[in-house]
Image (cartoon, rainbow, N blue to C red):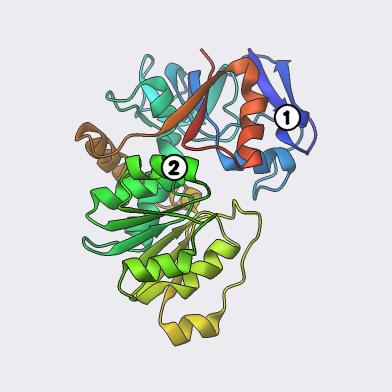
Amino acid sequence: MRAWHVVRHGEPAEVLELADVADPTPAPGQVLVAVRTVAVNFPDVLLARGEYQVRPPLPFSPGIELCGQVVAVGAGVTRASVGDRVVGSHIGVLAELAVLEEREVFPAPAALDDTEAAALTIGYQTAWFGLHRRAALQPGETLLVHAAAGGVGSAAVQLGAAAGARVIGVVGSAAKAEVARTAGADVVVDRSTQDVVAEVKAQTGGAGADVVFDPVGGSAFEQSTRCVAFEGRIVVVGFAGGTIQAVNAGHALVKNYGVLGLHWALYAQRRPELVDAAHVELTRLIDAGRIRPVVTDVVAFEDAPGAVQRLADGGTTGRLVVRVA
């Protein structure tokens, strides 16, 4: 089979090489998937750079999210059968075939095509756990979403709207504003021309945002601490802006807000039943027409390095998907 390999650490376009490798076989408890589509995620950028929390030995395949068809199962597998169309998450799926643990695959929602389904698992699971498990978002509350036109940001906007929250989306340019509005943002703030803190306070009558969803970090987090509401919750999802912020415990005490970390993969490891339940609920919302992944471009398998580099360069909206087959 063909697989993309990171052969050294660096920028994705420079370190990804296409390799011919032996077809894998599933061990007990594993499934073999013929990969149809792979969604590009920021961890793919970090994996290429050697900056992700997991550092596979070189060479290795990146790609952490797929849609495909089960073509073989190992002994003892009960939740997937040959022929099933599935979605799932596992490092190393940017290849024509991928082996995943059976707990890492889920039924692909019938209402989504392969490109949309590939972009479901990580973004929507992350947003779901951030908003509902960590922040306990309530109907009528104000939700502030940074990078609201991005993959996980647009998922958070959709899920916030579906939960009955009033959503304020922050974007980096006027060109990205419509993506956030289409996802369901009631108000869109363009941080390149508007003062985020002032706009949030103006839109909330000075009260601030009850929940902040932050996949950016750095200055976005600092802005959030200045416009979070009394008893507000800031959910730290990632640091796509490149700067890991320091939490000022004294400021959190004085303003009476909470800072909550979210590492979704830990739920998959420690509470997989919660991940299963979230997938059921996400599928219900898809079937009801309340949420749908925002796929803005689909590229050929041969063009995968360029797609990962585009994400690294920070100019994308929605999701980029690689079509493998």
Looking at the image, which residue is at 39% across and 15% down?
Answer: 82
Q: Secondary structure at mark 1?
A: helix
Q: Nearer the viewer, mark 2 or mark 1?
A: 1
Q: Residue furthest front?
A: 193
Measured as percent of width and height from the top left, residue 46 is found at 66, 44
Bin the neighbour count of mark 2 within 10 Å (Cα to Cα): few under 14, some 14-19, many 20 and up.
many
Q: Quadrant of the N terminus?
A: top right
Measured as percent of width and height from the top left, residue 134 is found at 38, 62
Looking at the image, which residue is at 41% across and 65% down?
Answer: 199
Viewed as shown, does residue 161 lie left or right of 80?
Answer: left
Q: Is residue 59 visible?
A: no
Residue type, numbered disc 1:
Ala
Q: Secondary structure at mark 2?
A: helix
Q: Distance between the Cα atoms at labels 2 and 1?
A: 23 Å
Q: Residue furthest left?
A: 288
Bin the neighbour count of mark 1 within 10 Å (Cα to Cα): few under 14, some 14-19, many 20 and up.
some
Q: Name the mark on residue 26.
A: none
Quadrant position of residue 209: bottom left
Viewed as shown, does residue 134 lie left or right of 242?
Answer: left
Looking at the image, which residue is at 34% across and 29% down?
Answer: 79
Looking at the image, which residue is at 42% across and 37% down?
Answer: 121
Measured as percent of width and height from the top left, residue 303 is found at 64, 19
Q: Which residue is mark 1?
A: 13
Q: Which residue is mark 2?
A: 123
Residue type, numbered disc 2:
Gly
* Nearer the observer, 280 or 45: 45
